[in-house]
Amino acid sequence: MAVGVFELFSVGIGPSSSHTVGPMRAGAVFARELRERGILGEVASLRVDLYGSLAATGRGHGTFTAVLLGLEGFEPEEILPEQVEERLASIADTGRLELAGSRELEYGVEDMVLHPLTVLPRHTNGMRFQVADDGGSPLHEATFFSVGGGFIVREGEEEAAQKELEESKQELPFPFHTAAELMGRCASKGLSISEIMLVNEKASRSEEEIRAGLLHIWEVMEACVESSLKREGLLPGGLKVRRRAPDWHERLLKEDKDRDPMYWQEWVNLIALAVNEENASGGRVVTAPTNGAAGIIPAVLYYALNYAPGMKDATQEDRDDAVVRFLLAAGAVGVLYKEQASISGAEVGCQGEVGSASSMAAAGLAEVMGGTPAQVENAAEIAMEHNLGLTCDPIGGLVQVPCIERNAIAAAKAINAAKMALWGDGSHRVSLDEVIVTMRETGRDMSSKYKETAMGGLAVNVVEC
């Protein structure tokens, strides 16, 4: 189906959309197929092979445990943090996995076969599942690729999936594949970017469902911040990274009792840090469009609701409208990155995650601040132009350093990009399409050391402990 706003913004668990959410989703698909084929009762053994980046940084990214949870039948949108802890503790204690929730097998993390230096042709995030009967005869196998943002693609179905995508896009009232096409739709119909996206979303949902769904996404983002502010101490994983959000929040409440605009950046930093500290803790977050970049859009949307002109004294209905328009506009730009380039750090580096999120956030902010379609497109272009070449080199394979601070920096970039675009008339020398193509080509040329393998950059130049 065509990529839409609810594919780009989905609820899952941390710390990574491509390394946690995607693998869990793939495992759940495989488990469901065993049940639907009626062969679950015959399964006597299980083999899981992880390739490339999933194997290289999977331990720090929660890939191995996510696969186990998926094979038990859990879906990332539905599982709760307490269920994660309960099931993983049980598997670790007993050494037994409940395949598809009912077939008990002796299996654990240590049984997975890792191939960190082997990259399958389709994508660096590859995984293969195989089951056999008690005689060793194969019963079922499948290979999946986690291509960023929690999206998965099955081996052998890439062309069919692409064909289905193109066909489903043509069924939309206002299909677009490039920013130029999107701008053309806006001009010919006299609609804003968020309005174009809304009309397309209405092809599969009612306007009431769209509005309620987007407001729910914002509620989960807010709940993520609230949960993070209650946690204290060090982040898990062994890097001994201290949580800063609770202390920063306490200090801001003392220093900025009246929400002085002077403190806008401190609040934006706080929201971004809080979301990504929660993500690093394996908490419940919204992929926006990935987990590694999950703090940028909530932080910029917070800015929009609290510091954009006219929003401070706005009614709740007006604030809700702003949330919906922001996420629709951001989603429209996200579609362009997903379909023309990539949002996977393992494929194009962090420019595909933090860069695309910053670009989407800039577009959303420019939209709710009254920008024309050309100004919104310009805001998105500026934000990505100044994230080009951003590497993905997490220390210890953990989504902590430099990921958490990087979200705060990118949120500020997005706000500045929107402001710069709004001070112009929408005309600009470099188009969003040109920047997206440049990002894709830069990612293709980038050394694999800097694409979520923990083999270069900060990952090797900073001592872990």
Image (spheres, rainbow, N blue to C red):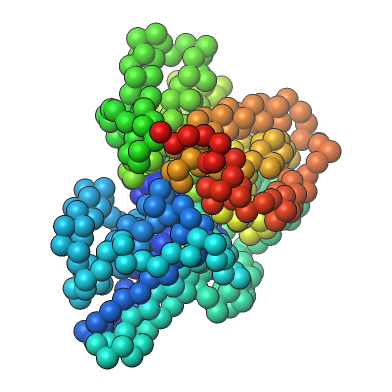
In the rendered structure, the answer to whether residue 58 lies left or right of residue 339 reads: left
Q: Name the residue: 27% across, 87% down.
A: 133
Residue 143 at x, y percent in the picture: 47, 74
Q: Choose between 259 and 121: the one closer to the eye.
A: 121
In the rendered structure, the answer to whether residue 249 lies left or right of residue 440 reads: left
Above or below 126: residue 341 = above
Image quadrant where residue 90 sits = bottom left
Question: Which quarter of the image is occupied by the C terminus?
Answer: top left
Image quadrant where residue 227 sits = top left
Above or below 248: residue 104 = below
Q: Name the residue: 56% across, 48% down.
A: 455
Q: Choose between 191 and 292: the one closer to the eye.
A: 292
Residue 105 at x, y percent in the picture: 21, 73
Q: Choose between 257 and 395: the one closer to the eye.
A: 395
- Please say whether residue 41 is visible from this viewpoint: yes
Q: Name the residue: 48% across, 44% down.
A: 292
Q: Name the residue: 26% across, 83% down.
A: 43
Above or below 250: residue 341 = below
Q: Choose between 128 and 265: the one closer to the eye.
A: 128
